[in-house]
């Protein structure tokens, strides 16, 4: 994998990733220096600044590999078109989980509180995309690469994407089944909800690019975690 050649052939993709990385590292640093608790809930005692630096570098290499194989892109000019898909679908899914919350009433501390949520969720969304989507995808496609031929490439990629959709949803299912709060029925409903989100996201990644996939999660997080996360405490508790 020749990174210099990849950059020369795809400068805008790497420039966009660079700008995103600077933004993610900036908001992570600001939040961590003002309040360590939000990241502590998710990554324990690890320093999030170090974690995100490593994540950005690893993500750069992983996405470069996917670009080098001409399987996926970081950014395409079609990103504006992608938003016509992202906004209504992410909005609808966000409303569904709010309805579930009104019916089930998730724990009060489900969401990071406002205003920390404004900085936390854009950064954690990046972490989730790299860990639950990009890393598993390059591992699976790396294993399947010998089987990929011009005639079956799309089929194998789509099968891989559908399998990867179970990584994040499966992670949450294991957590819920080990919790006293979630019954098996509720856990199954939420598992299905997260699985649908992942399937839609990965389909967007395949059709458009990484930025569009990340943007979908941002919109969903803005509705569920940030907007409703602010309102739900006074409505439900």
Image: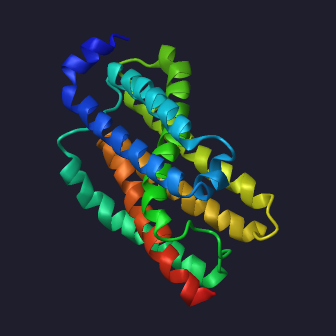
Estimate the x, y position of residue 14 in percent, counting from the top left.
27, 29
Q: Is residue 115 visible?
A: yes
Q: How many marks?
A: 0
The colour scheme used to paint the residues is: rainbow
Estimate the x, y position of residue 97 in percent, counting from the top left.
53, 72
Estimate the x, y position of residue 108 in percent, counting from the top left.
65, 76
**Image quadrant occupied by the C terminus:** bottom right
Q: What's the residue at 44%, 37% (across, down)?
A: 158
**Image quadrant occupied by the N terminus:** top left
In the displayed structure image, the side of residue 91 where residue 111 appears, left or right: right
In the displayed structure image, the side of residue 150 where residue 171 appears, left or right: right
Quarter occupied by residue 163: top right
The correct choice, above or below, for 104 with respect to 148 in the image is: below
Q: What's the residue at 37%, 23% (across, down)?
A: 64
Q: What's the residue at 56%, 43% (across, down)?
A: 48
Which residue occupies the foreground of this view, 62 or 36?
36
Quarter occupied by residue 221: bottom left
Q: Is residue 203 visible?
A: no
The correct choice, above or below, for 100 with respect to 180 in the image is: below
Estimate the x, y position of residue 41 in percent, counting from the top left.
66, 55
Q: What's the residue at 42%, 63% (across, down)?
A: 118
Which residue occupies the foreground of this view, 26 or 204?
26
Which residue occupies the foreground of this view, 200 or 147?
200
Quarter occupied by residue 38: bottom right
């Amino acid at each position: 994998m020749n990174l210099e050649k990849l950059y020369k052939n795809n400068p805008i993709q790497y420039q966009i990733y660079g700008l995103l990385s600077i933004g993610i590292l900036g908001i992570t640093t600001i939040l961590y220096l003002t309040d360590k608790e939000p990241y502590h809930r998710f990554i324990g005692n690890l320093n999030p600044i170090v974690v995100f630096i490593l994540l950005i570098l690893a993500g750069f290499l992983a996405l470069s590999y996917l670009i080098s194989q001409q399987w996926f892109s970081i950014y395409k000019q079609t990103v504006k078109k992608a938003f016509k898909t992202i906004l209504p679908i992410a909005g609808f899914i966000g409303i569904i989980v709010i309805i579930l919350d009104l019916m089930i009433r998730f724990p009060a501390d489900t969401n990071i509180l406002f205003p920390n949520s404004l900085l936390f969720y854009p950064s954690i969304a990046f972490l989730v995309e790299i860990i639950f989507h990009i890393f598993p995808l390059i591992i699976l496609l790396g294993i399947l690469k010998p089987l990929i031929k011009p005639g079956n490439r799309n089929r194998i990629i789509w099968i891989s994407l559908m399998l990867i959709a179970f990584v994040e949803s499966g992670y949450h299912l294991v957590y819920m089944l080990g919790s006293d709060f979630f019954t098996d029925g509720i856990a199954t409903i939420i598992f299905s909800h997260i699985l649908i989100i992942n399937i839609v996201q990965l389909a967007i990644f395949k059709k458009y690019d990484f930025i569009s996939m990340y943007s979908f999660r941002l919109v969903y997080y803005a509705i569920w975690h940030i907007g409703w996360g602010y309102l739900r405490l006074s409505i439900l508790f």
